Image (tube, rainbow, N blue to C red):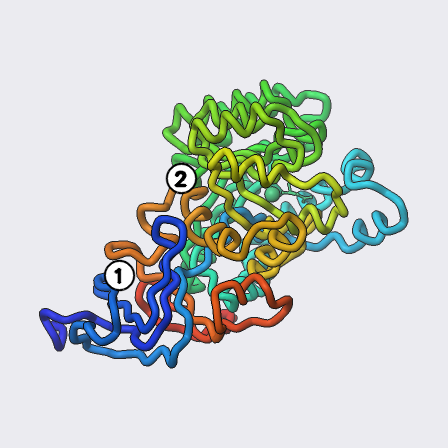
Amino acid sequence: MARPFETGLDSLFTNVQLATMAGGYGELRDGAIGVSDGRIAWIGLGAAAPPAAVVHDGRGCWLTPGLIDCHTHIVHAGNRSDEFEARLNGATYEDIARAGGGIMSTVRATRAASDEDLLRQSLPRIASLLAEGVTTLEIKSGYGLTIKAEAKMLRVARRVGQVLPVNVVTTFLGAHALPPEFAGRADDYVAHICEHMLPQLAAAGLVDAVDAFCERIGFSNAQTGRVFEAARAHGLPVKLHAEQLSDQGGAELVARFKGLSADHLEHLGEDGIAAMAAAGTVAVLLPGAYYFLRDTTPPPIAALRAAGVPMAVATDCNPGTSPMTSLLLAMNMACTLWRLTPQEALAGATIHAARALGRAADIGSLEVGKRADFALWDIARPADLSYAIGLNPCRGVVSAGVLRDPVVSLPG
Ligand code: NIG
Ligand code: FE
């Protein structure tokens, strides 16, 4: 069907204040942004805007790139409020994991759930993120730990992107914990990941990137390296849960593989920072886990900043260490707990998050040619997004050029 204005835009959002985040941060007052074929086709002053088939009045709202949550375990079954209580009664996260709870308790619940059940339990959490302007979401596996159950998690993750207006990026996290079937045989499980799980899941088109948990209660540096070799053999980018509870040299390892990101990083040392800076590996900061575990060692923010390592901010939404479904809250925590500036936090949830997913050419900033993913905010200044706690000022979301209400209705 011919478009009404062959030479014009499909749609124009005018009367908006743009925080473009192009090259880090940029503002354009009294701006407008035009969309054609789901892509940004024009950006400039409202007064100079070309004709468009549909014009939306932004009523003076701020318009930012759609937010990107670049690290989540949001597809899982059950919850672990019992462990939250146990920790408040004196147990530690590592005690609970060693006693067969922790990640393994979510593995049991996730294995037992059907595809439909897993989707149904996950959608309300995802809707909560979408209400705050999230347009791209990374979802990890890692609570299945068998080919069948990991495939189920990744299938459900892909399904999320079909039933809700969000762009989903999947990450295979088979090396999250040692499943009981391989008790005492961690090297055999790593071989199983490399020789069977990853090849089959990648062949099924379920994997966009590969992650691991490099930690005392996870996998060693050498075992993680083997998983990364396998990822490389399949042409898949890598990222890593690194230096969360102790320094395992994970950041240096993932940088050696030119990894997209090293995530958590509370116990990151100088060598890791230098390696990340040299490799262009993004530091993904997860203040929700730090807060929820009452950690007291902050990641070395000032040193990362001084080294020029891009810093992303994400929810790490998971039932054990960060049952958080608000990226705005993660931004606030990154500022209050770790002294990020509000501009850094916004870059962390947009352009640097895009880079942590290997998608910076396509999303994360308002630039001609990128996907038309925006959020409209009723705020006086962009810093308000990191400042308010518990207020959601999102007034509209545009996903691939299509305007929607922040609140999405769930299927079924
Ligand atoms: O990112 N650290 C490992 N993985 C998750 C926690 C998983 C869980 O406890 O269920 C994290 O913190
Ligand atoms: Fe995580």
Give the side of residue 198 with respect to residue 335, left or right. left
Whole-number angstrom distance, CA of label 1 to CA of label 2: 32 Å
Is 208 positioned to the left or the right of 110 in the image?
Answer: left
Question: Which residue corresponds to the image point at 45% horizontal and 36% vertical from the top-left?
Answer: 260
Type of the residue with mark 2: Ala
Label placed on residue 204 = 2
Estimate the x, y position of residue 86 in percent, counting from the top left: 85, 49
Q: Does label 1 or label 2 sit earlier along the sequence?
A: 1
Question: Looking at numbered disc 1 in the image, what kind of residue is underneath it?
Answer: Ile
- Give residue 256's mark: none
The nearer-to-camera label among 1 and 2 is 1
Q: Is residue 209 visible?
A: yes
- Give how far across and how far down residue 296 sits, in percent: 75, 42
Residue at 61% in and 46% down: 286
At which x and y percent is residue 38? 27, 62
Indicate if the residue with disc 1 has its beta carbon within 8 Å of ligand 2.
no
